[in-house]
Image (tube, rainbow, N blue to C red):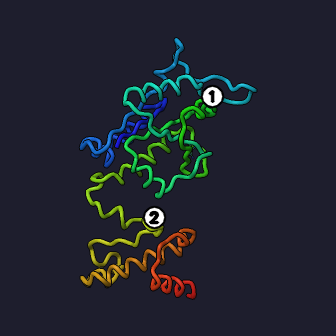
Amino acid sequence: MNFYIMTLFPEMVMGGLSTSITGRAMEKGLISIEAVNIRDYSMEKHRHVDDAPYGGGAGMVMQPGPVCDCYDALSARIGKRPRVLYMTPQGRVFNQTIAGELAAEEDLVFLCGHYEGIDERALEEIVTDSLSIGDYVLTGGELPAMVMIDCIARLVPGVLNNDASAEIESFYDNLLEYPQYTRPEVYRGRQVPEVLLSGHHKNIEKWRREQSIKRTYERRPDLLEKAGLSKKEKEYLAQLKRL
Ligand code: ADE
């Protein structure tokens, strides 16, 4: 899977994503990540890419020319016009379901704005999806792009050493993950739950599933409506609610 990031700060995104698991996935050739500098498409001597807003107001606006030319050049080079995800607090809020959908694409372009944003005409020309990482405002789209790429990349087969782990973690099936324990068996007087030492896989699975439901009920009850609970599990939840 190929990620392209259109940005004014290529070092920022490449620095972050070249380390750890995404870095290793790049080395293994499972994913590629390329930052494209929008400034390279400025037509000006001083390489400006922004100007004052028509109608007045604070700040600067990124001009449409460099943004569209950058995308056109990238598209021509790779021989297709991939989906363009614009990072903006005005977008749909990114979540695990959206990550799963995007992971099915072969190529994705992330468009990172700065200053007061990008000229609306450039957005109309090239953007296919507007996405936010939450209801707060950042100084640019680079951190949101990094967050989304990290999240999508770990869904690409082979990126995580353990393929199964993406299926039992938080938000899979709209439930939070159960608590995990490792050695020692007793730490500061706190004992590892007995069932996990029993070696009885059926009981362990049942306990974990119940812990997931309990946690989700306590911490993120909004998720439970979308969780696929069995009849028995719904009874367990009803019993929790009565306590
Ligand atoms: N750009 C600035 N703030 C943002 C946010 N919360 N999500 C996505 N892009 C942004």
The residue identified by callout 2 is 171
Instruction: Name which residue lies at 26% across and 72% down.
Output: 183
Q: Quadrant of the N terminus?
A: top left
Proximity of marks 1 and 2: CB atoms separated by less than 8 Å: no
Q: Nearer the viewer, residue 181 or 129?
A: 129
Q: Quadrant of the C terminus?
A: bottom right
Residue 70: x, y in percent? 47, 26
Residue 180: x, y in percent? 35, 71
Q: Nearer the viewer, residue 157 or 151?
A: 157
41 relative to 145, above or below: above
Q: CA distance from mark 1 to mark 2?
A: 37 Å
Query: Is tag 1's residue or tag 2's residue first in the polypeptide sequence?
Result: 1
How many numbered marks, from 0 up? 2
Identify the amino acid type marked 1.
Val
Identify the amino acid type marked 2.
Phe
The residue identified by callout 1 is 61
Quarter holding residue 35 = top left
Number of residues whose C-alpha sits closer than 10 Å to that of mark 2, classed few (under 14), some (14–19) or many (20 or more)? some
Q: Nearer the viewer, residue 192 or 213?
A: 213
